Image (tube, helix red, strand yellow):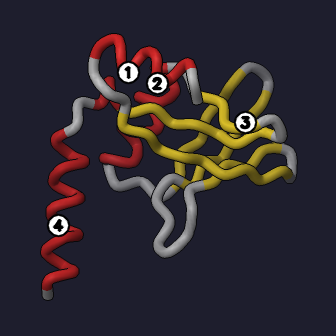
Amino acid sequence: KEEKKKERNVVAEEAAQPIERIRWLHETPNGWEVYSPEISRELEAARRAGKAEHTLRIGEDTYICRIKVDGGEPSQECNDESRRLRRHFMKEGLMGQWEMMSV
């Protein structure tokens, strides 16, 4: 019962975060790369709408993003290659900008 209450609090807290402060990242062989604010907004809007998957078109590539995974990590697939996704709550102001440069 207590665990369900904590889960509801986390969901409410996440929903209260402004969408502009959410950044999505994808894993590369060289570490994590931050998606642009536009792509992060698109992924976060899809997640908040309850979608389990969202398709991104970036340049010539199409990415299938699994953004809501029960018991697993979010991931994206393109050209038979799978990579992990990560969702990040950015701090406000200059601290948030600095934080994104150091990911």
Q: For mark 3, what is the residue?
A: 62
Query: Label 3 is placed on what type of residue?
Result: Thr
Element marked by disc 1: helix
Q: Dot 2: within a 10 Å radius of its alpha carbon, few (fewer than 14), some, or many (20 or more) residues?
A: few
Estimate the x, y position of residue 13 in percent, counting from the top left: 18, 50
Q: Residue at x 46, y 59 (%)?
A: 68
- Could you tell whether 1 is left or right of 39 in the image? left
Q: Which residue is mark 2?
A: 99
Q: Quadrant of the N terminus?
A: bottom left
Image coordinates for residue 48, horizontal then vertical, percent: 31, 47
Judging by the rendered image, the residue that carries numbered circle 1 is 96
Classify residue 90 by image quadrant: top left
Q: Which mark is residue 8?
A: 4
Left or right of 24, for residue 5: left
User: Residue 35 — which label?
Assistant: none
Give the SS element for disc 4: helix
Nearest to viewer (mark 4 / mark 1): 1
Residue at the bottom extreme, as displayed = 1
